[in-house]
Structure formats: structure tokens, C-alpha cells
């Protein structure tokens, strides 16, 4: 195992900040989207178009970021991507028509995708420099940032969304500029990749219960990611992902068919806990193939994020919503089966 230098520790702290910021800005964006819809006088179809534009921008940004990302370019990509994302959030807050929102959402998604690839590629390189798993901890910072962003959006619910977006954007852009000296010295640029080491849904229909569900799910994701690196180092990525996928399968199944609110909430929290290690491990595995591989894996995830609700909705129309929500449970079970083949020899 490599000795961890001060530069490596500084890089990890820097990237923790980037992941925190990404989580916070996405939570603020999502939490105040109803206010954006109201300000632009959009119906459901109009809002769907705006969200679609953001998703298309994200996928395009991931591909563009994957092509652009090189070790020497990562600092500039991190800084410029952060400033662009912050600026686009401000533009979204100032847009009061469908056409303006579509352009702003597309740009927001594009900037997010570029920054996402840069942060994850830099995280893989930093993990290689450490010689042990740290990716899960960095993704835990994203989850914690999302919790903080959601809390901020809740506390400022009475303030205009444009004010919140402008203040958040200015804060994050300022932080990115202030971090430029550290970002320029991002470590791990010349390190080689390390080899492997040893229920019923109506129970949740009230707003209070839905918010509790969201909080439990996010908290479980954060908790799992905070412990994921140690578990991965101890047992290896295939074992941890397989166990997590089985846990997610059991949790989601219980959350869907549970006949009491506590059981349903517990099931969904367990689902989040089980999935918490999956994305960091997949990005680590992709990191061996470089930035383009990271971009491809991340883009696939966002495509799933976009297509998944539509597919579940179609299945729910043909059957029932609880039945349709068992599809992710089946997919989690498939992850458990395929984990060893996909993740062997990827643990630092």
C-alpha cells in the first residue's frame, strides 16, 4: 500500500468539497422545481419537457466530459464545470418562460455532466494514490450535500426561488474560485491504477410520510457510503456489492409489500442502504478504462434515471404500482448475481 502524502489528503478533502457541492446544488434544484414551474406558468407537460432537457444535457455533458477529461485538464474542468453549473442554476432561477427554461435546463444538465465526469475521474485517480478504497466516502459526501441542500431549500421555502438559486450559485462559484490553488495541485495525476487486494403504497401517501421516506432513504445511502470504503477494503468490491444488492432486494420487496408504515419505511431505508455501495464500486471498476469509461458508466446511470420511471409507469398501468416497483428489486437481484464477474480485480 502506498504511503499517503499530504498532497493526497488535500486532494481527497478537495474532492469531498466538490461532491458536497454537487449534491447540494442538485437538491436545491430539485426541491424548488415546483416554484420554477409556477413562475413560468407551466403545466405538467411543460415541466416534463424542462426535466427532459436537463436529462439530455446531462447525458451530452457526460459524453463531452469523458472525451475532454485528461489528467492535466482535470483541474480546469473541475473549476470551469463548477462555475458553469452555478451560473446555470442562477439562469434557471431567472427564467420565466418555457423557451428560456428549456435552454437554461439544457445548459444546467450539460455543465452537471461535465463536472460529474471530472469529479469522478479525479476521485478514481485519488483513490489509486491512496491505495485503498475511498470512493464510497466521496459519494457519501454527495449524499450529505444533498441532505444539506434539501434542508436549505426547506428552511428558505418562503423566499423566492430565484433568490435561493442566485445565493447558492454565488456561494458555490466563489468556493470553486477560492479552491483554484488547491485544485491546480490535484494529486494522483501520474499514479497507476492499483491491483486488487486480497407494502402497501397508500400507507406512504401523506406528505409527511413521503418526506420521512425521502429522509430515511437519503440518510441510509449516506450511512452506507460512509462505511462502504472500509467494507470494500476488508471484503472486496464483489462481495460487498453482492451483499448490498441482496439487502436492497429484500428491503425494496418489504417496502412494497409491507402492511404497516414502519415496515414500509424500514424496507425503503434498507433498500437505500443496500444500494449505497454500488455506484462507487462501478465507477471504481470503470476508472481502470479512463475518463471515457467513467463517462459511459455514468451516462448509463442517468439514462436509467430517465427511462426507469417511464418503464415503471408503463408496467403500473398494465398491472399495479406495487407490482411494477418489484422490477428494481429484480434488477438488484441481477446485480448480486453478476457482481463478481463485473467487479473482480477492482479493489485497490
Image: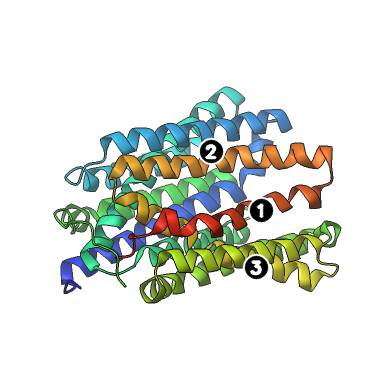
Q: CA distance from mark 3 to mark 2?
A: 24 Å
User: Percent from the top left, x then y, of residue 79?
Assistant: 28, 46
- Residue that appears at 21% across and 42% down: 70
Q: Which quarter of the rendering shows the C terminus?
A: bottom left
- Camera-nearest label, 3 or 1: 1
Q: Which residue is mark 1?
A: 330
The mark tally for this picture is 3
Q: Residues within 10 Å of mark 1 (few under 14, many from 20)?
A: some
Mark earlier in primary sequence (3, 2):
3
- Camera-nearest label, 1 or 2: 1
Q: CA distance from mark 3 to mark 1?
A: 17 Å
Q: Which residue is mark 3?
A: 269
- Residue that appears at 84% across and 60% down: 200
Can residue 217 be seen here? The reply is no
- Residue that appears at 73% across and 68% down: 265
User: Percent from the top left, x then y, of residue 259?
Assistant: 86, 67
Q: Which residue is mark 2?
A: 303
Res 215 quadrant in image: bottom right
Amino acid at each position: 500500500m502506498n504511503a499517503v502524502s499530504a498532497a493526497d489528503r488535500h486532494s481527497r478533502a478537495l474532492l469531498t468539497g466538490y461532491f458536497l457541492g454537487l449534491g447540494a446544488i442538485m437538491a436545491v434544484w430539485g426541491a424548488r422545481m415546483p416554484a420554477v414551474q409556477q413562475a413560468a406558468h407551466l403545466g405538467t407537460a411543460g415541466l416534463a419537457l424542462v426535466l427532459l432537457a436537463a436529462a439530455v444535457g446531462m447525458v451530452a455533458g457526460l459524453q463531452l466530459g469523458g472525451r475532454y477529461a485528461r489528467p492535466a485538464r482535470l483541474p480546469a474542468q473541475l473549476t470551469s464545470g463548477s462555475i458553469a453549473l452555478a451560473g446555470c442554476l442562477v439562469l434557471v432561477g431567472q427564467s420565466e418562460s418555457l423557451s428560456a427554461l428549456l435552454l437554461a435546463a439544457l445548459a444546467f444538465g450539460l455543465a452537471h455532466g461535465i463536472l460529474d465526469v471530472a469529479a469522478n475521474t479525479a476521485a478514481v485517480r485519488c483513490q489509486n494514490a491512496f491505495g485503498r478504497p475511498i470512493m464510497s466516502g466521496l459519494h457519501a459526501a454527495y449524499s450529505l450535500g444533498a441532505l444539506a441542500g434539501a434542508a436549505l431549500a426547506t428552511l428558505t421555502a418562503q423566499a423566492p426561488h430565484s433568490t435561493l438559486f442566485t445565493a447558492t450559485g454565488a456561494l458555490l462559484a466563489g468556493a470553486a474560485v477560492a479552491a483554484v490553488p488547491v485544485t491546480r495541485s490535484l494529486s494522483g495525476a501520474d499514479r497507476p491504477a492499483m491491483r486488487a487486494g486480497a407494502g402497501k403504497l397508500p400507507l406512504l401517501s401523506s406528505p409527511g410520510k413521503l418526506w420521512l421516506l425521502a429522509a430515511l432513504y437519503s440518510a441510509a445511502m449516506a450511512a452506507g457510503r460512509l462505511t462502504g470504503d472500509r467494507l470494500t477494503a476488508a471484503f472486496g468490491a464483489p462481495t460487498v456489492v453482492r451483499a448490498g444488492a441482496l439487502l436492497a432486494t429484500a428491503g425494496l420487496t418489504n417496502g412494497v409489500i409491507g402492511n404497516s408504515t414502519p415496515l414500509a419505511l424500514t424496507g425503503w431505508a434498507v433498500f437505500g442502504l443496500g444500494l449505497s455501495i454500488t455506484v462507487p464500486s462501478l465507477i471504481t471498476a470503470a476508472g481502470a478504462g479512463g475518463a471515457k469509461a467513467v463517462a459511459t458508466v455514468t451516462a448509463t446511470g442517468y439514462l436509467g434515471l430517465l427511462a426507469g420511471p417511464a418503464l415503471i409507469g408503463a408496467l403500473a398501468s398494465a398491472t399495479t404500482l406495487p407490482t411494477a416497483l418489484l422490477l428494481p428489486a429484480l434488477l438488484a437481484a441481477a446485480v448480486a448475481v453478476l457482481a463478481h464477474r463485473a467487479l473482480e480485480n477492482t479493489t485497490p
